[in-house]
Amino acid sequence: MNAQSPQPLLTVRGLSRYYGQHVGCRDISFDLWPGEVLGIVGESGSGKTTLLGCLSGRLDPSEGSVLYRDRAGQSHDVYAMPEMMRRRLARSEWGIVHQNPRDGLRMAVSAGANVGERLMAQGARHYGGIRNQALDWLDKVEIDAGRIDDSPRTFSGGMQQRLQIARNLVSMPRLVFMDEPTGGLDVSVQARLLDLLRRLVGEMGLSVILVTHDLAVARLLAHRLLVMRGGEVVESGLTDQVLDDPQHPYSQLLVSSILQV
């Protein structure tokens, strides 16, 4: 590579997490590139959620390293940096979209405050400016501006998920972790949310690590896939390549089970 070539946003090497004798994930290595959506797929218990927790700084790995390249181009070992710095990174350059939006929202404050808090965490103090940005993001995620002062408790599940997305993206993160973002939603609501996510990810040039058991979601959003089984990556490659011509017997089983539904 020459000096102008992009460098990985995230560099993962030998990442493992053990729970006593049980393997959460083992010896995972990959690079995530700027603007890339990496899907992690597998059935329940395959280790994908444990891996996501280690990548996002919420679970300490037993072995291995996660290096993140910040806006300034500096590389940081996520688990060697001070806790305060890791939290600051999580508020500014990262976002986390949980499967249950209630895990990613403050249910006791208004929709506008949920979005505005992220800006305030970055130092914004002008109330009018914060409110205007909140209104702008409610519009981006297709929530009526008239709901800005309403509690998220009064929102449907799909609206809560869209609000969680606005809360995460308002600060213009570079890397977003998504854990089953359409899980638990009705099919029609899922389709609308997926269209929204695909548009926003493309417009913002986001890098995303997406955990899902739904191969249709992976095909729509992800450029590349890791297929996990028993805590290990058994196959990786471009999304269409893996889903159209799976090489590992487990990947073949996953794909065939979808085709038979």
Image (cartoon, grey):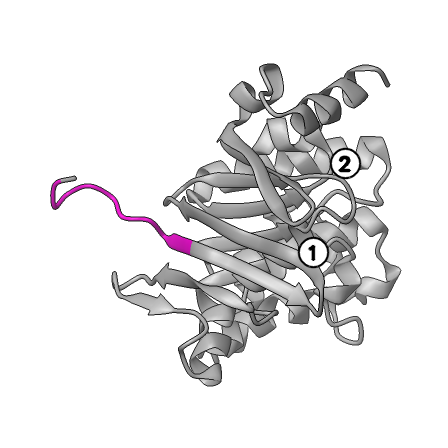
User: Residue 53, labelled with which disc?
Assistant: none
Q: Is residue 95 placed above or below 194 in the rendered structure?
A: below
Give the residue displayed 56% in from the left and 23% down from the top. Answer: 242
- 95, 17: nearer the viewer: 17
Could you tell me if the residues under marks 1 and 2 are in contact, i.e. CB atoms within 8 Å?
no
Q: Quadrant of residue 117?
A: bottom right
**Residue 9 located within the stretch drawn in magenta:** yes
Disc 2 residue type (three-letter): Gln
Q: Which residues are magenta?
A: 2-12
Is residue 124 positioned above or below 162 on the image? below
Within 10 angstroms of label 1, few (less than 14), some, or many (20 or more) residues? many
Dominant SS in magenta: loop
Reading the chain from its start, which is encountered first: label 1 or label 2?
A: 1
Classed neighbour count for the residue bearing mark 2: other residues with Cα under 10 Å, few (<14), some (14–19), many (≥20):
some
Residue under label 1, please give it.
163
The residue labelled by disc 2 is 190
The percent position of residue 165, horizontal first and vertical second, equals 63, 53
Q: Quadrant of the N terminus?
A: top left
Q: In x, y percent, where is residue 239?
A: 54, 26
Label 2: state its secondary structure. helix
* Secondary structure state at the residue bearing disc 1: helix
